[in-house]
Image: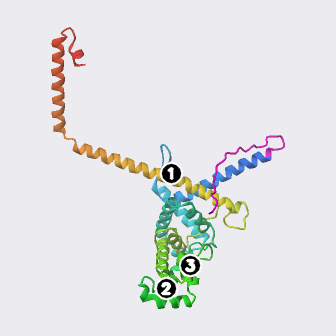
Amino acid sequence: MPTPTYTRAVKLRLVVPRGANDHGSTQALWTTHQEVNNAVRSYQEMLIAMRQGQYEPRDGAVVTKAEVQKQAKLLLKGAWDANEVPEEARSEEQALEALERLYHVIVQGTAQEANALISPFFDPDSSAFAGHLEIIRSLPNWLGGEIDDIRDAAQQWLDDGHHHQLKPSIGSPPKWYRKALAGDWDWPRDLHAWGEGKKDEVAKGPAGLVLRLRELRVLPLRLSYFAPRLHSKSKVTPWDRLCFRLAVAQLESWQTWTEKSAEEYKRRTEDLRKKESNFKEEDAKEVFEALQAYEQERANESMALNPHLGEEEHRT
């Protein structure tokens, strides 16, 4: 039985040297914080441009949808210019739609999915998600049939070694692969489910949108923030990955609360509309007349019992 492991958060205090000869350490720390903040802001601006929706950065300030779309178009133009795409091959409307859909997939996804998108955005040599199409193309055409009907074709497929083409190069082999090697004849069903999952990822997840943007020659979208500044051989540095994840996390929280606020406003507005539509002026008039008659009756009784008080005191 494996030994359980536990994680404990510990707060640490960083003591910065403040001596006469330690100014460089303090400045380096401040510069690091400043550059990280600048990188996060840069990635957030990119993602907000992809969103293409109106937003309010602060009270009283509104950035309209038209202004944001202008930034998105500039982002596309920069990408196409850098990727040397001729004017006649640029499909702006399709690219804008794909970018907007990808934004929502990113902010609604997991940190792992966001991390997988960093390289396609900034690295021209990235092959992320390219394997999905290769897997779909390599799926055998007998999938989905009854075991007894496909047994011979499935066995021949194994004997020819085609199953090795679908095995991921890294990570644990999928369940269908392990079953096939073990001689468990339930493996075609697992292969079918696995293949459908890959198709679903392409249709609904980031994979399909990344592949679509590659077709439109939008990717890479721009340079990463830190790699050029650090003169890195890699197009994406660990600092870029950190700051991109921070940018996504903050936008995820912002997007969630924006949607919740919009839903709450819509619900309350609809509730008010229903109450107003159910409110009949004539019915209200009858209610108020009955209430006024009751108040007058109570005032008359009070005046009879306390004649020394005025009418207003009796009503009170």
Amino acid at circle 2: Pro
Q: Residue furthest right?
A: 21
**Residue 253 visible in the current orientation:** yes
The magenta region covers 1-23
As drawn, is 274 to the left or to the right of 24? left
Identify the residue under disc 3: 178
Q: Residues within 10 Å of mark 1 (few under 14, many from 20)?
A: few
**Residue 44 visible in the current orientation:** no
N-term mark: 2 or 1: 2
Identify the residue under disc 1: 254
Q: Indicate which label's residue lies in the foreground, 2 or 1.
A: 2
Q: Is residue 157 magenta?
A: no
Q: Residues within 10 Å of mark 2 (few under 14, many from 20)?
A: some
Indicate whether 293 appears above or below 105.
above
Kindly identify the residue that appears in the image at 56 percent across and 62 percent down.
Answer: 114
Kindly identify the residue that appears in the image at 52 percent across and 75 percent down.
Answer: 89
Indicate whether 90 appears above or below 240.
below
Amino acid at circle 1: Trp
